[in-house]
Image (tube, coloured by chain):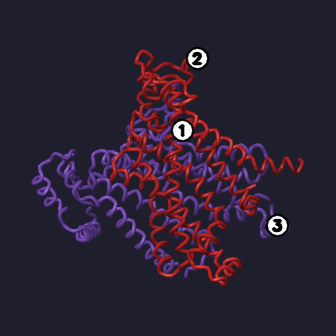
Chain colours: A purple, B red
Amino acid sequence: MAAYALRRLIQFIPTIFGVILILFLLLNVLPGNAALMAGGAQDVNVDATYIELMKKEWGLDQPLHTRFLDYMGRLLVGDLGKSFLRREPVADLLASRIWPTLKLAVAAMGIAVCLGVPLGFYSALRQGSWADTGSMVGAVSGVSLPQFWLGLLLMYLFAVKFPVLPPQGYGDGSLSHILLPGFTLGVGYMALLARTTRAAVVEILTTDYIRTARAKGLPGIVINRKHVLRNALILVLTTAGLQFGGLMGHTVIVEKLFSWPGVGSLLVDSIFQRDIPVTQGCVLFLILVFLLVNLAVDLLYAVIDPRIEYR
Amino acid sequence: MTPGLRKLLQRTNLLVGGAISLAVVLTALLAPWIAPYHPIDDANLLYADEPPSARFWFGTDSQGRDILSRIIYGAQISLAVGLISQGLNSLIGILLGLTAGFFGRWWDDLVMGLTNIMLAIPSIIFALAVMALLGPGLVNVFVALGLTNWAYSCRITRSQVLSAKSLDYVKAARALGYGRWRIMITQILPNIMGPVLVVATLGVAGAILIEAALSFLGLGVQPPAPSWGGMLSFAREKIFTAPWISIFPGLAIFVTVLGLNLLGDGLRDLLDPHTSQQRR
């Protein structure tokens, strides 16, 4: 088990390194522009000597590989650089935003798992019934829904038409504030989990070991819980992990829609302000959470699925 | 249930999805003839924020433009973004996947390494990063989305090539002395187009959704162009006074993406009967 965990951890390193490299190249291929941004100037009519000065101050006159090594070195000690605009460490700007984002993601995930998995399970057990057809139509629709539109509709319904929930904002961070954004973010994910659960359960129900369990007279509820659900969970967990990235991506839109003070809002603002170090920091954070969740999922396999070999 | 009816029901996805997609394509092509007003020029502040009526079926926006007309023209933007960017994704993905699967060795390792890194970056976040570099605009949206989702096409192409490589028709082509590129392009590619097409169809849907999201954030297609997502970005402030501005553009995105997703699912069921039995 420990060796398996270690192996997964070691595999994790090249991926995160690759992600950092690609993002660095992407956001830093135009050093001239970066200097303009660092200087706080958006237009081209800036004095050339001023640009040179800025390039020097921010180390943008160095060759790309030197800058990358420098960047990596500072990343290792948790230094994400300084904001062009506010001249504060990016890490400080991020720190205050992390908690709201994580709270939102966990709320969405909780809603999705608590509704999606039972829905898919029920559909699979009642294959071909109207309930099954209905919930699967709902699942395809959920995947196709633009989140921000759903959010607008929910906002209209629960904050304008029947004003029971606050339309936007973090407020005191209480449950009533998180319900609308959490549900908006969770719906697409819920639909995916329902579809996956249904497909997994339908497949498991046709296997020999379920037939054997039935033949030896196990009560249905025991079969469903011990054999079907447990095996289905492995597949559902894989999907949940792989699709978690989509959830992290969508936090950007949902946060912006509901004026939620998280990393996603900071990311969008930083793009508008052309504040590249902040953009880089936010993007890196969102991807890192996604990768860590996947790592956790891989390690969880070992707990849920006794067949996994810890090679 | 008669077998014919059952077969038809199994193809519901394909039929409904195909019908919706066709309707969207026709709307985009015929926009100048079916739209009652011009989407940008016919702005009249006297009719600002009018609710749906016989004159303006879907109401008007804050500048007095007919929302129905803007939605009809918006189909052109969404389809163009979906098709062009997915075309770019497919091109990159097929080229990399085909060569990686066929040549193998270090090239395969390199391509798969890159693919796995791309899959580790959520599409919206990558698209946002590219837009941060390029700045907003329609052409930049094509580029950003065209570079975002190729990893899915690449992965499916590669896995198909790997299984096709040992099949008799490829061996026969080798025995006939065909060159490697000729085998790849004239022999393998036509035989693996099915799954690649399914991924591409779902990719068009995904690209349309991301474009809408980018434009909603104000980083995609810029006003006054009638992008569905862009129309929604002004809807939030108006939600108390003019909620219809929020409803119809979103409905257009939803129906279009739903249609393409159903079409993709239907194609998969049609092309791969094995999984369709499990999926019913």
Task: Confirm whether circles 2 and 1 share one chain.
Answer: yes
Q: Which mark is residue A275?
A: none
Q: Position of residue A155 (x, y in %)?
A: 49, 33
For this view, does A178 lie left or right of residue A54? right
Nearest-to-viewer mark from 3 and 2: 2
For this view, does B7 lie left or right of residue A70? right
Query: Mark 2 or mark 1, which has the lower sequence index?
Result: 2
Pointer 1: residues within 10 angstroms few (<14), some, or many (20+)? Answer: many
Residue drawn at the location 52% of the way across and 54% of the way down: B86
Task: Confirm whether circles 3 and 2 share one chain.
Answer: no
For this view, does A4 lie left or right of residue B126? right
Furthest residue toward right? B2
* Chain for numbered disc 2: B
Residue B144 or A219: which is nearer the viewer?
B144
Q: Which residue is mark 1?
A: B75
For this view, does B262 lie left or right of residue B61? right
Task: Identify the image quadrant of residue A301.
Answer: bottom right
Quadrant containing the C terminus of chain A is: bottom right
* Chain for numbered disc 1: B
- What secondary structure is found at the residue carrying circle 2? loop
Furthest residue toward left? A49
In this view, A177 is above or below A190: above
Residue A83 or A177: which is nearer the viewer?
A83
What kind of residue is marked 3? Arg
Q: Which residue is mark 3?
A: A211
Residue drawn at the location 41% of the way across and 23% of the way down: B63
Nearest-to-viewer mark from 2 and 1: 1
